[in-house]
Amino acid sequence: MVSAEFQQYVGDNLQRFAGEIIRLASQPSVSARKEGIEECATLVETMLREIGATTKVLRMDGVAPLVYGEVKSSRSSKTLLFYNHYDVQPEEPLELWKSPPFKPEIRDGRIYGRGVSDDKGELVSRLKLVEAYMKTSGGPPCNVKFCFEGEEETGSVHLEEYVSKNSDLFKADAVVWEFGTVDLQDRPKVILGVKGMIYVEFVLKMLSQDAHSSYAAALPSAPWRLVRLLNMLKDTNERILVPGWYDGVETLAEDELSVLEGMPFDGEEFRKAYGAKEFLGGMNSDMAKKALVQRPTGNIAGIWAGYTGPGSKTVLPKEVHAKMDFRLVPHQDPADLWAKMRKYLDDNGFGDVEMQLESMEPAARTSYKDPFAQSAIKAAAKVYGTEPVVELGSPGTGPLYLFTRRYKMPSVDIGVSSEESAIHAPNENLRLDLLQKGILWIAETMELFAAS
Amino acid sequence: MVSAEFQQYVGDNLQRFAGEIIRLASQPSVSARKEGIEECATLVETMLREIGATTKVLRMDGVAPLVYGEVKSSRSSKTLLFYNHYDVQPEEPLELWKSPPFKPEIRDGRIYGRGVSDDKGELVSRLKLVEAYMKTSGGPPCNVKFCFEGEEETGSVHLEEYVSKNSDLFKADAVVWEFGTVDLQDRPKVILGVKGMIYVEFVLKMLSQDAHSSYAAALPSAPWRLVRLLNMLKDTNERILVPGWYDGVETLAEDELSVLEGMPFDGEEFRKAYGAKEFLGGMNSDMAKKALVQRPTGNIAGIWAGYTGPGSKTVLPKEVHAKMDFRLVPHQDPADLWAKMRKYLDDNGFGDVEMQLESMEPAARTSYKDPFAQSAIKAAAKVYGTEPVVELGSPGTGPLYLFTRRYKMPSVDIGVSSEESAIHAPNENLRLDLLQKGILWIAETMELFAAS
């Protein structure tokens, strides 16, 4: 059980902790543009040293450094791994930010800025809880390892190589994943896995130059051909039409299904937060909840061709691009699906369409019955005074499988954010009250884990 | 018949004429961005005065000025109207230009720059041929009127009002339209009309903010809904599916069909110039030729949503935009089709999709048997030493109907450009040899017209 001194220390230093998040989020680190990555890695290492961790910066040519840290415990031989990332999503669209994305500021009890929640706020919370242990009881209740990567937002494409090459370094008994949240009613959520993902950019080039659009009567159109390709990829019931896409996907076991059904989910609140008139395909709230956990998706994250300025330009665009992310559930193998999609395109006359792979990752899940999962659930109830929401899997994605499969260890996603944190969007933010509570929540989980 | 002195003058002054095109094209005048329009109108008026024309600048609030000019003839009471425009298409994509679009330069016998062909090169050719008449025979063979507008590239949306309010001013017996060209074998083309057009921007907004793309499992997607809308607008045979879209469209008369069939068209050359593997829908060259003249189109000129930068961003875009131009043939009424499209969307569950009208214009055509058309045909044969290509209608669009309907007069499209002029595209250019020949061609046409 977390000590009174620990709690006192966190409360007394909360403003300073917020300042540390601002310090880290002031350093841009947009992996999609390879911007500020090196500088940010250096800052993260500095911050690790400041709390007394030993550090190691792993490097590969042309790749974002992986910053590793370690703090030993004198109280337990168990080891907990914290995985976080110091890179962030691009900040566009800039015009919708109320304050500059890389000059974070505090307004009304929240920090606003790119990455203050995802994932720099989470990362700093892990550092500061270990600092609190150092200051109040000489060290954490179990050994702690930190794995801070810089390519998560571009699909963690080199993490596997880093982990393979340093297999002993990351060995642990459990992992606290990058991100944790309370729901819209401030109930803490224990998230037990992630979806997988294939991120692909389709590129169709049909002309060597843009043509006057009057020639569209005779010349082929890349945008129209993309429309037909997309139409062939997914039907109006949102089912991916690539043959074999759903092979191996299992329905949930009875007990899992009842955990899922018992999960509170204010669908109306969620829907309204995004100003959607209705859920996709007219689903009700209960169906939407299940879809978030269990439905594979095929999302158009970006599409562009031709003239996109004001007024009119009569042009037949020579090419078109579409970025798509396909979220996967357990038992879908991304490499296999990638090959099936390529074949599907080839078989249907789209053999000349380029598929540029941005990233692929399988899904990963820990059973809610696992003792580590149960530690996080009990700790949540204690800190928040309310039963937590248990989520079998997040709708999001991360390279969790790399650790859970290799070391056969359980994982939980718990942390300091909220569903109003606007991650990946303008005005990303972090509530200071949740920063405090989230630190205590993780600490309680560590105590139960160390004692188990 | 054009005098030897006239021919000599044009030859001797060709480099200076090219300089005048560079002078005019150095002044940006992008109507889509309302950039440089006023300055360009002033320059056009100056250039009209420099050749001895009387001028008048017509104005309406917030609208590009219409520059009018007039030169009387002592040799004929007939009046020829020259319609041109001083605005240009946007210059994007900038990175594909080999020299700056608004700093025109001459390389290998061509002027390169935005508008040097469409339509500032054409406009200057009209000015300079009248100048040549003034200098060599005291004036043109017929009265000349100049109508130079500044909103052609955004659909000439105020031209009708300008013409209606100044109905006597533009009255003439025939009109030489804005643009003329030789084909890829340097045969002059006499073009006898234009297609009509509806230019619309579809806007779909489905969320109040961009969402993390993991929520695509439950929230609706604007890009996917657009794909389905587009799929409903046109089938894979390129047929517009809006009910009634083809009502009233007439097949060509026997003699027109034989003119069309007799029109030389090097489909392979045209196809290769744009690097297309095949024509739209696998048409052969002959079908492509007919399609350019006679097929209504529905072109995606621009489409955009979500993240369009490098790398990956996992976002569910809140909205999507598509700019489309629908080319129309004679007897299609744009206002009627606009209403039918709106109803089609409403009837099929797309009532919330915004249709932002950019412009609409009906098609217009002059018979190849018309005496004025025959003058241009004969003049072409004389100047180029080869039978011209007679094109019943251009695949392009312009507000020709405003003049041909109101004044019941014939029109021809003849001029100084080529099919390699890359109009609306990067590296737009004008061949100096064609500048010279085109001026003689129009002059010969005027002589035949004045004498008829």
Image (cartoon, coloured by chain):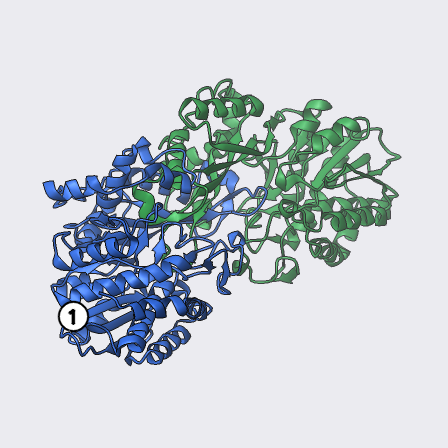
Chain colours: A green, B blue
Residue B245 horizontal side relative to residue A113, left or right: left
Q: Quadrant of the C terminus of chain A?
A: top right
Residue drawn at the location 23% of the way across and 58% of the way down? B379
Nearer to me, B170 or A50: B170
Residue drawn at the location 53% of the way across and 22% of the way down? A339
Q: Residue furthest front?
A: B4
Nearer to me, B64 or A166: B64
Place of residue B57 in the rendered image (x, y in percent of width and height, measured from the top left): 30, 79
Label 1 resides on the chain identified as B
Label 1 secondary element: loop
Q: Quadrant of the N terminus of chain A?
A: top right
Residue B398 horizontal side relative to residue B333, left or right: right
Asked whether residue A278 appears in the rendered view, the answer is yes
Place of residue B240 in the rendered image (x, y in percent of width and height, measured from the top left): 24, 41
Place of residue A232 in the rendered image (x, y in percent of width and height, measured from the top left): 38, 29
The kind of residue tagged 1 is: Ala
Residue A181: image quadrant is top right
Residue B371: image quadrant is bottom left
Is residue A367 placed above or below B116 in the rendered structure? above
Residue A444 horizontal side relative to residue B257, left or right: right
Provide the residue designation for mark 1.
B172
Label 1, residues with CA under 10 Å away: few <14, some 14-19, many ≥20: many
Nearer to me, B181 or A233: B181
Place of residue B135 in the rendered image (x, y in percent of width and height, measured from the top left): 32, 77
